[in-house]
Image (cartoon, rainbow, N blue to C red):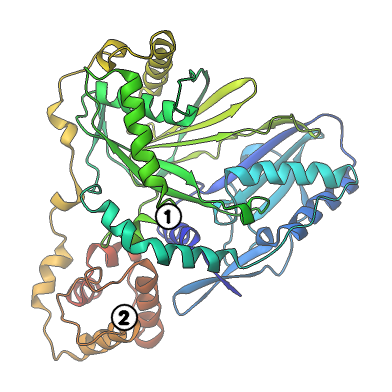
Amino acid sequence: MSQLSFTQHGMWIAARMGAATAYHMPIVISLATAPDRSALAKACAAVVERHPLLGSALRESDGEPRLVPTAELPSLESAESIEEVVTRPFDLGTGPLVRFALVGEETLVVVAHHLVFDGHSKDLLVADLAAYYRGDTPADLVHSDHVGAQRERVAARLEDAAGFWTGRWHEPTGTAVPGEVLHSRGAADAEVLEFPLEIPALDGVTPFEVLVAAVHALLGSYGNPEVVTALDLSTRTEAESGHIGPYVNELPLFSRPAAGTPFAEFAAQVRAELRELYRFREVPLARAVPGIRPHAALAPVSISYRRLPDAPSPLGDVQWLAFNHSVRGVLQLQIAHGAQGAVASLRHDPLELSDAGRFADDLTRLLAAVAQEPGRPLGGLADFAAVPPQSAGTSESSVPASPAAAAAAAVSAGDPLVEEVRAIWEQVLELAPIGLDDDIFDLGGHSLTITQIVARMQQQLGLEISLDDFFDNPTIAGVIAVIRR
């Protein structure tokens, strides 16, 4: 058994709290010719053998999940529809965490869970699958303890990362868009809008940085004096470059777009802040900042960007941005940038964002204006609106206390159940004494210690409490009040 990376553990927590298909990562390939099914099945099996993480399952022990080999490796299936293959749930406890299916005669659908996969993994899987299918053997991979090495790097940077986020991080409030305010950071059923996007070239700024600056400028024009977006950042090192896995971390970026700032200057500011953030790109925010409650997304709006392989796949036409029918947060802008330009996939929750087309059109127009005149002030690229009163939204700190939190005042020391729960906390946290109103995050706890406490309470005392309730009531008194309500 092998331990999970910090990224995987965060995904596991989010999945336990209900993430639907938000972590399903599909690839749809329209095969160039009718396949030799036997050869294709062997190629799929060879890919899983080469990247054993795909043939994994999760086994939980004392609240801590570990990766184990699945009892039954994936095989090439036949399916009636792409949607069925993409949306069928994964059983994380039994695995495998990838599936291969032929839909009709010439459409191959591959779906992997984000626990073992990321955007660059799509490139690797398609390339390796094509090589095995044509009878070639990809170059050998050197397998090592990538998770252990990453944990060591994170531990070395943790103190500096905590200092970096002090004064930068605060819980996002609502993000204003025309006629609406976006709040959700959970997972939801989604709709998708796909469109081409021209990202202009600017001296000294990468296409990703131009894109992020454009999104921030646009959101600033909608009346948000401070803009925050969640960014998917690759954490791959050279040692991990050829390996399939979830080498990614989501981090927030804050900015304050001003109407009078030239776009080129604003893009340079965004670049400078990103360069600072990149120093800690491997450190999960929840490890550096105590008390962060798990969410499917760190902000209502998120951005991911990646370059596509230079050459087309010999297998056929690949849909790199195939839709998984879910969104993390309210709006996810996923960009695939290749030799023929960029394609945007705008996944959105229609219950919170009813006019995704407006956002897509505004972003397209803003980038076109930047291409014509990069030095134009932000206010000349888009009309900066007055700040709408409701844009401040509702932060988590202003949410009224739960009934359980109010009932926690009645919990007292000496109660046998209280003392049994206190003993478990002290065992897991290796700290004593712990007061009834001590916040677990102030004591150095995090999502892993919480899952261990939840597991031991269930095993030793027969008590059940959901992760949602625990995170909302992170004291011994609060937990007891939830159990007794």
What residue do we see at 32% from left, 63% from top?
A: 159
What residue would you read off at disc 1?
18
Q: Position of residue 26 (x, y in %)?
A: 62, 42
Residue 346 can be seen in this image: no
Q: Position of residue 392 (x, y in %)?
A: 16, 36
Residue 123 can be seen in this image: yes
What residue would you read off at disc 2?
429
Judge whether 253 appears above or below 152 on screen.
Answer: above
What residue do we see at 45% from left, 20% from top?
A: 202
What residue do we see at 76% from left, 33% from top?
A: 313
**Is 153 placed left or right of 168 in the picture?**
right
**Is 248 placed left or right of 97 in the picture?**
left
Q: CA distance from mark 1 to mark 2?
A: 26 Å
Q: Secondary structure at mark 2?
A: helix
What residue do we see at 34% from left, 86% from top?
A: 461
Number of residues whose C-alpha sits closer than 10 Å to that of mark 1, classed few (under 14), some (14–19) or many (20 or more): some
